[in-house]
Amino acid sequence: MSIHTSIPFLDLVTPHLELEQELTDVFHRALRTAGFIGGPMVEEFESAFADFCETKYAVATSSGTDALRFALMACGVQNGDVVVTVPHTFIATTEAISQAGALPEFVDIDELTYNMDPAKLREYLEMQCAADSSGRLISRRSGRPVTAIVPVHLYGQTAHMDPILDLAGRYRLLVIEDACQAHGAEYFSRKHGRWMKAGSMGQAAAFSFYPGKNLGACGEAGAVSVNDEILASKIKMLRDHGQAKKYYHDMEGYNGRLDAIQAGLLHTKLGHLAKWNAQRRERAAEYNRLLCAANCGVKPPYEPSWSKAVYHLYVVRTDDREGLMHHLKQAGIGTGIHYPIPLHLQKAYGDLGYVPGDFPNTEQAAASIVSLPMFPSLTSDQQQRVVHEIRHFVQSLAPLPVERT
Ligand SMILES: *Cc1c(COP(=O)(O)O)cnc(C)c1O
């Protein structure tokens, strides 16, 4: 048995204890006005989150999945369209696409960044699609029109957006970012000559405030960031039964609003997000340093020069993933796999007709990745113990020659 205390994969308790007074004040304020749906608390949070994302608008929703679905629908994705994304993501990405009436089709990820590989996207658009007589881009696979791309900023690192946006421009495709794991991540756009925030680069972007995300509600929540005023108002209608004015329904919508209490709690926590993200970046740099010094063959994540990642997850690669996870569990250290089964091989997507081998980078990643404990209050001592245990496990696999005396 280990004499050490355990190290959780994620510590959600500490930040809430630190902010307990401020957070309960929000609750009291809501109780006194009984304004539980919409109202000033939601609007104030939306405006603050738009500022954070460097976009003109943010529209708060009941979840990240709703945010992505509403963004796709508002941007004009129609029933029967194809939306291109990656198979290495959480299923909510493709649920939103399907539930907007479209069909997801996949392109593989880059093996180093785990995000959409622009070269694979180009190959898909050039080789697996063709223009029909009216000039629409048609997928050969499904015979349906391709209208949008959903790059996912996985683990808190943006996809390589310049070449993706370039291709989208060339083929007149919409780009809706899945920024559900990337609040505050930045991308250096050579085209614009500056750093840009995740969620500010496509037509619209979806964020999730699921409790474990870098900015988490005390329940379910999400938002769309968007620069276009008409899109923002469409998304507001979609989340609220298709009405801009009470009981005047221009279309059918959904019940996808954000509770005022959650908005208030998120607004309070948003004030700490930049600091928390900086702490995550420091912890990631520390892991990188420790893993490099340990020289144990466990591969740290790769952050290109054009990226400032916010490390929603700290994901390493190793040959014996199951063994390592088991060893860390015995040592009281929490880990996770994000994600073990690529979407194209999930039972839910059997009908799409993909087979093993279709997306090798995704499949190899899914078989060898493991997420280590990562949260703002993680300490250097805890990280040293994590890496100590990793080295211990790797050495137990291939024992160094014992020196004889
Ligand atoms: C969390 C997440 C979502 C969905 O967000 P919910 O708020 O849980 O609906 C979508 N995409 C990705 C990549 C996510 O990590």
Image: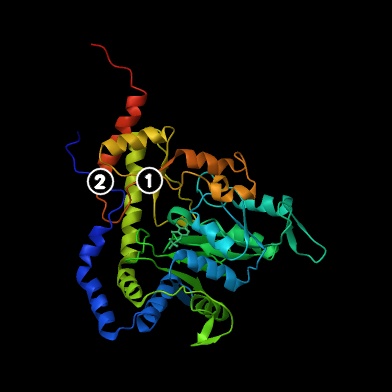
Toward the left, the furthest residue is 3
User: Badge 1, how many Cα within 10 Å: few under 14, some, many 20+?
Assistant: some
Above or below: residue 301 compared with residue 267? above
Residue 74 vs 121, above or below: the answer is: below
The quadrant in which residue 361 appears is top right
Mark 2–mark 1 distance (CA, rounded to whole Å): 13 Å
Inspect the image, locate mark 2, and give the three-letter code of the amino acid beneath it: Ile
Q: Earlier in the sequence, mark 2 or mark 1?
A: 2
> Which residue extends farthest right?
133
x 61%, y 50%: residue: 107
Q: Which residue is mark 1?
A: 336
Kindly identify which numbered label has been placed on residue 7. Answer: 2
Instruction: Say which amino acid is labelled 1.
Output: Gly
Horizontal side of residue 158 vs 401, given as left or right: right
Q: Which corner quadrant of the figure contains ligand 1? A: bottom left
Residue 326 visible, this angle: yes
